Image (cartoon, rainbow, N blue to C red):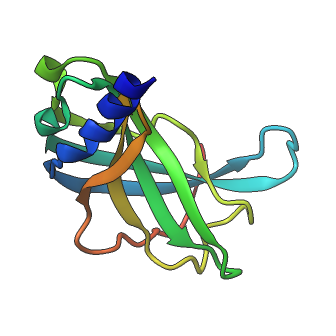
C-alpha cells in the first residue's frame, strides 16, 4: 500500500502544460422536429471545428490514457450556465498524442429551451482528463477559443 501511495503522489511531480489551438470554422443552427414530439420544433447546432494540440507532455510512466473532449460553454436565454460536450476522443499512446483534427460535433447539440434564439455567444474549449494507472484523475484545458462564437439565426430543415 505504501508503494501504491508513493506512485500516486509522485504523479503530482510531473506538471505538464499542453498547448493547442482551437478554431470554430462554422456554426449552423437548424430548426427541425423534436425527436419524441413530432409537432414541436427544436433548434440543433452543427459546429465545424479545427483542433491542433500536442498532448505528448501529459504522457509519463503513470499515464494509462487521456480522455479528450470539446466543450461548448454558454448561458441560455433563461440565465442558466451550460457546459455541453460536443466531441470526444480517447488517446491511449504517446505516439497518438499529437492531435490534428478537422470535423464536426459528434453529439447532438441542442438547448433545453428548444431554441438558440437570444442566447449569448458561446466559448469553446478543448479539455482533457489524464487517467493514471495508480492515483487520482487530473483535469485540464489544452485550448480555448479567444473570442466567443455567436449562434446564427435558425434555418428550417428542408
Left or right of 157 on screen, residue 18: left
Name the image quarter holding residue 50. top left
Residue 108, position as x, y percentages in the image: 58, 41
Left or right of 89 on screen, residue 153: right
Residue at position x 40%, y 27% in the image: 2
Q: Foreground: 148 or 5?
A: 5
Residue at position x 36%, y 28% in the image: 132
Residue 71, position as x, y percentages in the image: 43, 52
Is 5 rendered above or below residue 108? above
Residue 1 seen: yes
Name the image quarter holding residue 62. top left
Residue 56, position as x, y percentages in the image: 12, 33
Residue at position x 74%, y 66% in the image: 113
Q: Foreground: 42 or 132?
A: 132
Is 85 rendered above or below residue 35? below
Residue 146, position as x, y percentages in the image: 22, 71
Left or right of 73 on screen, residue 157: right
State the quadrant of the C terminus: top right
Residue at position x 62%, y 74% in the image: 76
Residue 134 seen: no
Q: Foreground: 47 or 138?
A: 138
Q: Residue furthest front?
A: 2
Left or right of 157 on screen, residue 74: left
Count of numbered circles in the view: 0
Amino acid at each position: 500500500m505504501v508503494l501504491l501511495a508513493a506512485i500516486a503522489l509522485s504523479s503530482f511531480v510531473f506538471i505538464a502544460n499542453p498547448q493547442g489551438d482551437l478554431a470554430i470554422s462554422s456554426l449552423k443552427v437548424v430548426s427541425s422536429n423534436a425527436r419524441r414530439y413530432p409537432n414541436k420544433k427544436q433548434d440543433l447546432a452543427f459546429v465545424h471545428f479545427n483542433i491542433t494540440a500536442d498532448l505528448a507532455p501529459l504522457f509519463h510512466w503513470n499515464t494509462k490514457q487521456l480522455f479528450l473532449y470539446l466543450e461548448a460553454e454558454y448561458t441560455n436565454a433563461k440565465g442558466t450556465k451550460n457546459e455541453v460536450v460536443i466531441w470526444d476522443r480517447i488517446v491511449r499512446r504517446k505516439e497518438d498524442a499529437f492531435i490534428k483534427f478537422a470535423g464536426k460535433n459528434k453529439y447532438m447539440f441542442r438547448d433545453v429551451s428548444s431554441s438558440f434564439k437570444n442566447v449569448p455567444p458561446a466559448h469553446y474549449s478543448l479539455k482533457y482528463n489524464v487517467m493514471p494507472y495508480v492515483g487520482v484523475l487530473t483535469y485540464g484545458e489544452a485550448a480555448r477559443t479567444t473570442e466567443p462564437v455567436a449562434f446564427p439565426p435558425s434555418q428550417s430543415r428542408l
